[in-house]
Image: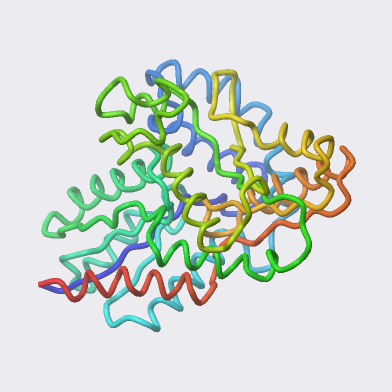
């Protein structure tokens, strides 16, 4: 058997132009694991309620973060791929769940290189049906159609794995050494119904205030519980004092309830609670992107400072941090060492 590695991230428009942003949003929002309603209703919501106006606003946001090399998420992911390739002996490919480089193109590339046993590393540390699950299931679907001889091994969510937590703590160390009043963990939000749909017991998630700390099989696929475990492991390793940090969820869409508290509301409230110097970290993202650079680093900063804060610092994502590359290398090492 010949082995290979496939990294999968979320994706980005090919450019910040309105047509490219519209194309990206259409593919993203028509995914039934993102907007989880029946196809006809999803089509109507996307094509008649969202796409007529949202691409223009999103394109302006993408313009604000675009680099000469392209989308920060894609550029950084490609750099991680290249650096990881320099550390391991098997071929490493990169695909995006939406747009380019596409999953079909990359699966074909791995097949041409003779890789018939592939480690799939979804670049989402936590399980969510709208990120980890959709990426994994799409790769499986494409591999069955284009490379039926290919065997996939899926790296489990690594939300509290020592390598990931060590990389997070290492990437934040410089910021935590500075004076600060509070550390806000801002995770990407998901609708509450997604947690209930992912709950194999059908009754545990969001059943009470302590559901995330009460042992249950549901936690293997519970995004919220895994976010809390990331925070617990991080503050222990980084030595963040109790009472000096909190958790929020960003990027909600639509009117249905999403995980709370909402990050934009927390950023507006914190100065009134005496927080003047704020640090923000976004552990659900391994690469800086629109949601970290523009939503938190630009709009979130403006919200916090406008509410009376005096100092705002966004801790960068793991990006190409050496400890993150080391964590990925160890994942690959375990895979290649197995018989």
| Of residues 205 and 255, the one drawn nearer to the viewer in this rendering | 205
Q: Position of residue 68 (x, y in %)?
A: 69, 67
**Is residue 1 depicted above or below 309 in this figure?**
below
User: Is 50 located above or below residue 283 in the figure?
Assistant: above
Looking at the image, residue 193 sits to the left or right of residue 138; the answer is right
Tell me where residue 53 sits by quadrant: top right
Query: Which residue is at the front of the view, 242 or 130?
Result: 242
Quadrant placement of the N terminus:
bottom left
Q: Give me the residue at 15% from left, 74% from top.
A: 2
- Where is residue 147 shown, x and y percent of the image? 18, 57
Residue found at x 15% / y 58%: 151
Q: Residue at x 33, y 38 (%)?
A: 219
Side of 287 where 18 appears, left or right:
right
The residue shown at (90%, 41%) is: 308
Which residue sits furthest front? 242
Residue 57: x and y, percent?
Answer: 72, 37
Where 93 sits versus 11, above or below?
Answer: below
Residue 113 sits in quarter: bottom left
């Amino acid at each position: 058997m010949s082995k290979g590695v496939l990294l999968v991230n979320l994706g980005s428009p090919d450019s910040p132009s309105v047509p490219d942003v519209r194309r990206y949003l259409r593919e993203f929002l028509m995914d039934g694991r993102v907007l989880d309603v029946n196809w006809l209703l999803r089509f109507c919501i996307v094509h008649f309620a969202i796409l007529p106006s949202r691409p223009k606003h999103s394109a302006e946001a993408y313009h604000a973060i675009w680099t000469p090399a392209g989308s920060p998420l894609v550029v950084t992911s490609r750099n991680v791929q290249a650096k990881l390739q320099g550390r391991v002996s098997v071929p490493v490919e990169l695909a995006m769940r939406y747009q380019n480089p596409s999953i079909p193109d990359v699966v074909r590339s791995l097949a041409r290189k003779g890789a018939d046993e592939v480690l799939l590393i979804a670049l989402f540390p936590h399980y969510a049906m709208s990120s980890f699950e959709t990426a994994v299931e799409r790769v499986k679907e494409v591999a069955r159609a284009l490379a039926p001889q290919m065997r996939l091994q899926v790296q489990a969510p690594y939300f509290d794995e020592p390598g990931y937590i060590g990389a997070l703590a290492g990437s934040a160390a410089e910021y935590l050494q500075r004076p600060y009043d509070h550390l806000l963990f801002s995770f990407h939000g998901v609708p509450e119904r997604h947690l209930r749909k992912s709950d194999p017991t059908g009754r545990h998630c969001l059943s009470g205030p302590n559901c995330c700390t009460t042992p249950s099989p549901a936690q293997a696929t519970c995004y919220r519980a895994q976010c809390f475990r990331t925070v617990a492991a991080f503050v222990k390793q980084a030595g963040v004092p109790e009472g000096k940090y909190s958790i929020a969820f960003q990027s909600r869409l639509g009117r249905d309830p999403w995980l709370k508290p909402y990050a934009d509301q927390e950023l507006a409230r914190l100065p009134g609670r005496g927080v003047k110097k704020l640090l923000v970290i976004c552990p659900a993202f391994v690469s800086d992107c629109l949601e970290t650079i523009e939503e938190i680093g630009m709009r979130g900063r403006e919200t916090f400072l406008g509410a009376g804060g005096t100092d705002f610092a966004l801790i960068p994502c793991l990006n190409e941090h050496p400890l993150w590359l080391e964590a990925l290398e160890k994942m690959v090492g375990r895979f290649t060492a197995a018989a």
